[in-house]
């Protein structure tokens, strides 16, 4: 059993930011991370460009300076490594949080250790829980929910499912690598959320016939060597080697509910105070996109990074109150 002032579950930007702010109080936060720091960003596509500018991704008063206004994935990895080093954060990498139990304090059990802490912050994000297709063949090995880079799919028939940024980014990279790309989207026109600087390039390739775009389409079945779709109420069968289902992600509600955190059935939003980020469980806080419930477009790094300040302020007030009582 190891004692810590605060356990933070999740070593993404919002979890790191919370640790930095709590550290300023003179407390010792321990970060539990199942991979290594900013694990979700590491799993982004190799050539991913952020929607946000670098200054909006900065945390811990460490400037994020890049030549281009919008940084790429690799720039972010370098930056957040430097943040951890500068602030000497206590990160327990490759350690999975298994359970959090509440008594007079919190007992946090992980794959490697057990911790006792007065406060817990959950900043686990979404990225490990992709939305799955509910069609025959969705579990075939050729169906993937994460895109890394295009090279393995050279000269292959690839279907990308989705119409937002992750789908458009994947389709462009696949096309550059020489894939024969088809994009299936249930909407009747491009999503308004697609990055404005990539939509003209993508639409140009569609108009030129370099990428096949199927609006108003749904997947009926995925089979070895082909996929069956309904496009504008018409059945179509396409040759296919690989499928990328880029249809979003969702929070791990079970983990939150195991801790006793209330979850709104309709929105998936956890029960928490928006001013302090404290949940319905006393001294248990949440930070980052997990606070948004099922709406992944509500909280990003650029606004979730400020949750740490709210949490630190709430903890400082609790500590001051306790000291007055003592």
Image (tube, rainbow, N blue to C red):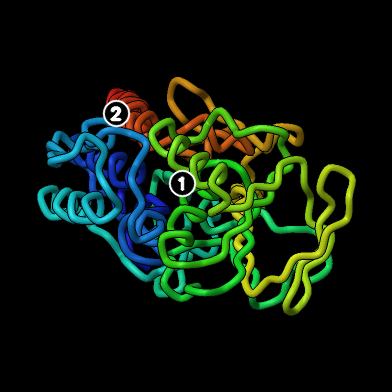
Query: Residue 301 lies in what quarter of the image?
Result: top left
User: Is residue 289 found left or right of 324 in the rendered image?
Assistant: right
> Quick one: quadrant of the N terminus?
bottom left
**Rendered residue at 41%/60% (across/down):** 176
**Rendered residue at 52%/62% (across/down):** 146
Question: Camera-side residue: 317 or 15?
Answer: 15
Q: Closer to us: mark 2 or mark 1? A: 1
Quick one: label 1, few (<14), some, or many (20+) residues within 10 Å? many
Work out whether residue 65 can be spotted: yes
Where 145 sits versus 196, above or below? Answer: below
> Quick one: quadrant of the C terminus?
top left
User: Is residue 251 found left or right of 237 in the rendered image?
Assistant: left
Question: Camera-side residue: 257 or 176?
Answer: 176
User: Is residue 96 found left or right of 81 in the rendered image?
Assistant: right
* Residue 25 x, y percent position in the rendering: 20, 35
* Residue 217 x, y percent position in the rendering: 77, 47
Are the residues at dot 2 and dot 1 in contact (C-beta closer than 8 Å)? no
**Rendered residue at 21%/34% (across/down):** 69
* Residue 4 x, y percent position in the rendering: 31, 54
Q: Determine whether the residue tagged by mark 1 lies in a helix, strand or loop.
A: strand
* Residue 243 x, y percent position in the rendering: 64, 66
Query: Residue 319 lies in what quarter of the image?
Result: top left
Where 25 sits versus 153, above or below? Answer: above
> Label 2 belongs to which residue?
316
User: Is residue 19 found left or right of 283 in the rendered image?
Assistant: left
Work out whether residue 103 can be spotted: no
> Label 1 belongs to which residue?
122
Question: Camera-side residue: 299 or 106?
Answer: 299
Question: Camera-side residue: 21 or 232?
Answer: 232
């Amino acid at each position: 059993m190891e004692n810590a002032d605060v356990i933070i579950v999740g070593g993404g930007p919002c979890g790191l930011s919370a640790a930095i702010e709590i550290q300023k109080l003179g407390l010792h936060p321990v970060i539990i991370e199942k991979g290594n720091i900013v694990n979700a960003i590491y799993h982004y596509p190799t050539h991913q460009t952020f929607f946000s500018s670098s200054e909006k991704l900065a945390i811990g008063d460490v400037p994020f300076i890049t030549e281009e206004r919008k940084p790429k994935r690799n720039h972010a990895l370098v930056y957040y490594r430097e943040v951890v080093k500068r602030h000497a954060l206590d990160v327990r990498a490759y350690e999975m949080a298994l359970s959090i139990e509440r008594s007079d304090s919190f007992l946090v059990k992980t794959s490697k250790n057990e911790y006792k802490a007065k406060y817990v912050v959950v900043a686990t994000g979404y990225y490990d829980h992709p939305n799955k297709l509910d069609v025959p063949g969705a579990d075939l090995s050729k169906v993937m929910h994460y895109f890394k880079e295009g090279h393995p799919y050279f000269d292959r028939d690839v279907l990308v499912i989705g119409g937002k940024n992750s789908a458009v980014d994947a389709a462009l990279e696949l096309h550059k690598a020489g894939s024969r790309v088809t994009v299936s989207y249930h909407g009747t026109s491009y999503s308004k959320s697609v990055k404005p600087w990539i939509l003209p390039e993508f639409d140009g390739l569609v108009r030129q016939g370099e990428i096949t775009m199927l609006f108003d389409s749904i997947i009926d079945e995925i089979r070895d060597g082909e996929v069956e779709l309904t496009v504008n109420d018409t059945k179509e069968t396409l040759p296919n080697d690989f499928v990328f289902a880029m249809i979003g992600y969702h929070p791990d509600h079970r983990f939150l509910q195991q801790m006793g955190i209330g979850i709104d059935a309709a929105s998936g939003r956890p029960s928490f105070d928006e001013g302090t980020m404290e949940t319905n469980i006393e001294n248990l806080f949440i930070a980052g996109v997990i606070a948004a419930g099922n709406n992944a477009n509500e909280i990003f790094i650029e606004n979730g990074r400020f949750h740490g300040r709210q949490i630190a302020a709430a903890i400082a007030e609790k500590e001051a109150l306790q000291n007055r009582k003592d």
